[in-house]
């Protein structure tokens, strides 16, 4: 085992990795799935081969390749990627109820039979196997894109290609799959990243909600967002934008980048950020289309109950009127009873929010 096999690098918890559609042709994979990476004139571009063990995934990437059940079994270090892949493989076989000849799918000479329909975990593994098989047969013609980050690199685009190289390295034990062609840019550009995601037209409903949140965060560069790995859940990270307003005149920029025409869709993505974590994870793992998730959002069982209007209660109205008179006219007093009543009401509202 090479020395670089023993290098450890730190990933964010619940590493977000992208989800792409499978293709057996590397040309089709590059053209249809990856699209063209549009680099601005200010970016200095370098193409080189980098060790897959020196590259980190972008924790804010809206796509997911690895199912949540497999991510939970990954420590996030370089020397445990193969263990995560093995866990993913076991999960897929347990889900579908039959053996999956992963090695033959990727580097074998014979065609393996495919089921007409696949379960979610099985389907995600087969998609990665297809891409790895294409790279094994024809090579990789479209490099990934990375930005220098301290002594390592952070992925901007191509996380699924990077993961396919890990799969090839593990299955073949061949060091030629340790180094992946990469374009090196000055910095990660979330708008460029979003444009590539949009070009593929296959982000699921949760992925599009993540994409919306990432672009909203870009409008607030001075906001101290909690890092992904410190949030209690994947959804909670993106939900940090729920209380942020769209900057004046910037709505069209998000609409154009995400290739949508209706502002009502942005409202729906905001609602998606507020669903229960279990719904969020299930919808992402099972690749729900927007129509299915939207039907859940519109169901009464998942519609949050708004807090009661403070003036709907007669006692509240009397207390507020007294406070208003004191503040505006200096007429009357605010009693301790009024203060206690307001404190109790605020506690009740907080519990409901």
Image: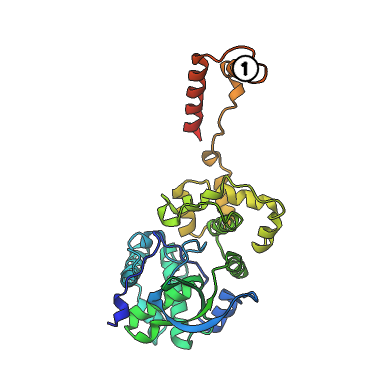
Q: Position of residue 39 (x, y in %)?
A: 62, 75
Residue 50 vertical position relative to residue 290 in the rendered view, above or below: below
Q: Is residue 98 shown to the viewer in this render? A: no
The total of numbered circles placed on residues is 1
**Front residue of this view, candidates 6 and 162:** 6
From the viewer's perspective, tell me whether residue 351 is left or right of residue 271.
left
**Residue extending farthest left:** 1
Q: Quadrant of residue 103?
A: bottom left
Q: Disc 1 on helix, strand or loop?
A: helix
- Dot 1 crowding, Cα within 10 Å, few <14, some 14–19, many 20+: some
- What residue is drawn where x is 60% and y is 22%? 312
Q: Position of residue 10 (x, y in %)?
A: 36, 66
Residue 165 vertical position relative to residue 96 in the rendered view, above or below: below
**Front residue of this view, candidates 10 and 276:** 10
Q: Circle 1 sits on which residue?
A: 326
- What residue is drawn where x is 49% and y is 55%? 283
Q: Position of residue 129 (x, y in %)?
A: 42, 76
Q: Position of residue 270 (x, y in %)?
A: 58, 49
Residue 82 vertical position relative to residue 344 in the rendered view, above or below: below
Q: Quadrant of residue 53?
A: bottom left
């Amino acid at each position: 085992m090479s020395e670089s096999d023993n290098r450890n690098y730190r990933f964010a918890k619940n590493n977000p990795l992208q989800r792409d559609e499978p293709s057996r042709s590397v040309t089709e994979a590059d053209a249809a799935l990856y699209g063209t990476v549009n680099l601005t004139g200010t970016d200095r571009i370098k193409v080189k081969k980098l060790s897959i063990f020196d590259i980190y995934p972008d924790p804010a990437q809206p796509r997911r390749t690895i199912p949540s059940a497999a991510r939970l079994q990954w420590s996030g270090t370089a020397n445990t990627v193969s263990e995560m892949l093995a866990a993913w493989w076991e999960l897929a076989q347990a889900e579908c109820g039959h053996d999956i000849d992963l090695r033959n799918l990727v580097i074998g000479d014979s065609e393996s039979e495919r089921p007409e329909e696949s379960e979610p975990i099985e389907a995600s593994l087969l998609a990665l196997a297809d891409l790895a098989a294409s790279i094994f047969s024809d090579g990789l013609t479209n490099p990934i894109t990375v930005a220098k980050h301290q002594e390592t690199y952070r992925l901007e685009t191509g996380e699924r290609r990077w993961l396919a190289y890990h799969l090839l390295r593990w299955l073949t034990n061949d060091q030629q799959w340790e180094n992946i062609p990469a374009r090196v840019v000055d910095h990660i550009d979330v708008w460029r990243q979003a444009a590539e995601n949009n070009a593929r037209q296959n982000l699921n409903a949760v992925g599009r909600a993540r994409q919306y949140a990432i672009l909203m965060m870009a409008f607030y560069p001075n906001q101290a967002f909690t890092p992904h790995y410190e949030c209690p859940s994947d959804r909670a990270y993106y939900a940090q934008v729920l209380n942020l307003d769209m900057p004046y005149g910037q709505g069209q920029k998000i609409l154009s980048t995400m290739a949508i025409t209706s502002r009502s869709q942005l409202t729906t993505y905001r609602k998606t950020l507020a669903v229960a974590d279990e719904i969020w994870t299930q919808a992402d793992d099972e690749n729900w289309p927007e129509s299915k998730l939207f039907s859940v959002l519109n169901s009464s069982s998942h519609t949050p109950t708004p807090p009661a209007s403070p003036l709907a209660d007669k006692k509240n109205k009397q207390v507020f009127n007294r406070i208003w008179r004191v503040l505006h006219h200096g007429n009357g007093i605010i009693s301790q009873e009024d203060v206690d009543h307001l404190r109790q009401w605020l506690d009740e509202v907080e519990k409901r929010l």
